[in-house]
Amino acid sequence: MYNQSDTPASARSSDLPQSTRTVRGEGAPPPLSRPTKLAFGIGAIAPGVTAAAFDFFLLIFYSQVVGLDARLVGLALMISLLCDAISDPIVGYWSDNLRSRWGRRHPFLYGSAIPLAASFYFLWTPPEHATQTALFWYLLSLSVIVRTAITFYRTPASALVPELTPAYHERTSLYSLRYFLAWVGGNAVSVWTFAVLFPMFVTTTIADGRFNRDAYPIYGLVGALAILLSILVSAVGTHARILYLKSAPPKRQLTIGTIFRELIETLSNRSFVSLFIAAMLAAIAGGLAAGLALYFLTYFWAFDERQTAAIFIGTFLAAGIGLVLAPRVSRSLGKKRGAIIVGLVAFVGAPMPIILRLVDMLPPNGTPFIFWFVTIANIIDVGLIICFQILFASMLADLVEDSELQTGRRSEGVFIAAETFIDKAVRGIGVIAATTILTVAGLSPGAKPEDVSADAIWRMGAYYVPIVLSLWIAMIVAIATYRIDKTTHEENLRKLAASDSG
């Protein structure tokens, strides 16, 4: 499956620079082995589990199960994102400049594992019989800790991709594996939760295990263990590559003014500005879509926990689509053109089942057709979205050499941090929009599906569709102004190689 980049044969002259000099030693590093690639990919399970928790479970758990007002949940999540966003440029710049015997990135990987796993578990054990104020502060505090801890892992880990390989297409293949395992790992925990855990907590008074508070500490424990193992496997599995990674720049006098000047110089790259704007729009739309995803499955389509588990199982197939499709799209269309075409199909198609329901072109809920229609549509659409995400991430990686030519510095961490910064800084806007839609539509905290009126469910879909479509289309327009293609990237590599040899 990965033989395009697993062997020395993948180091084609059309895909690799003439010089792959590292700061730590002369000569090209050995090709990435399959175990190293797999270990690096497994590291994506930790952010995958965390993202699934925040996207699918946290809002409905604190709002509908614990009973915290949805607006307070949205406010807590938005504030936590804003607080966490502050850590992104700090961690990114720090990891670009850290000098240690374990390189620039790995100290962050090892150091984040236990704090992240522990705080993730406690997020799902809020105090019982607490006031709205106490629950708000508990959620806010733990959310900030979890999000900050994942930043200390995810930013340095993601920054490894441009260092592990300079090859234009191999970067896409490496991101394909990482995104595939992120989706598979994160959704494996979700599928287990819906298919096994929630049915175990159905009682005579609670007909749906999703609304049983006692199930969530177990979910938190399983998620925490998956996070811990993912990070440690990735850190240990890539440890041997430290010898071939870029070293930190020479020691210099760093002041606040110097740091800000270097950050501004790095982030003023024109193609980065295009991706920055696109990431901002995507973050808002993603926060909105993710915040309401479980609401649509539970209330709009009236799926039970086992049907919801099946939807998540379908995501495994979707991840496979993204894994296979992204490298092929990259080679046949290029990353930018491929991202635009795939993105348009994916994001315009995403709300189509909801639109068809709103205009009464589908049979009633509960019929077999509805389940299979939504499931198949979701598999295809999520597969295309994963393909788009892989291409977008690989486009971001190609900024490293373009920026290095302009600034003379390797800034992998800064670019990754800037992308995650904007995601966190504005994603809360999408979450707030989601909770606002719930409130305006008339879904009250703690309401069971049978207690919600058909009009409220219809309004939820009608408010959601035009907002999310506008955001996705604007994002595609922003990507269209990105300027780096394969030819530009290879020219950047040649110029850097000539500079190194000179």
Image: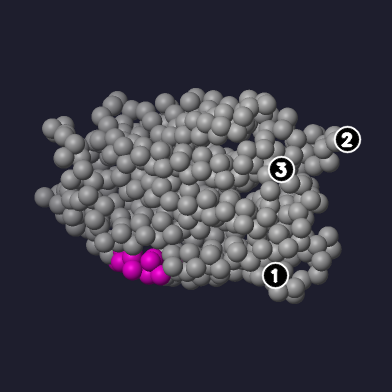
Q: Is residue 484 above or below residue 60?
A: below
The quadrant holding residue 124 is top right
364 sits to left or right of 466: right
* Residue closest to the far left: 502
264 and 183: which one is in front? 264
User: Which residue is rendered at x = 59% and y = 69% of the image?
Assistant: 349
Q: What range is drawn magenta here?
A: 476-487
Q: Secondary structure at mark 1?
A: helix
314 sits to left or right of 40: right
Q: Amino acid at mark 2?
A: Thr
Find the distance from the CA under tag 2 to the CA under tag 1: 34 Å
Mark 1 crowd level (few <14, some 14–19, many ≥20, 10 Å Cα): some
For label 3, the residue is 446
**Looking at the image, do the residues carrying marks 1 and 3 touch, with CB atoms under 8 Å apart?**
no
User: Which residue is rendered at x = 32% and y = 41% of the image?
Assistant: 89
Find the distance from the CA under tag 2 to the CA under tag 3: 18 Å
Mark 2 crowd level (few <14, some 14–19, many ≥20, 10 Å Cα): few
Q: Secondary structure at mark 2?
A: loop
Q: Secondary structure at mark 3?
A: loop
Q: Amino acid at mark 3?
A: Gly
**Looking at the image, do the residues carrying marks 2 and 3 touch, with CB atoms under 8 Å apart?**
no
Q: Position of residue 279 (x, y in %)?
A: 41, 56
For label 2, the residue is 204
Q: Position of residue 67 (x, y in %)?
A: 67, 38
User: Which residue is rendered at x = 68% and y = 48% of the image?
Assistant: 444
Find the distance from the CA under tag 1 to the CA under tag 3: 25 Å
Please give the label number shown on residue 358: 1
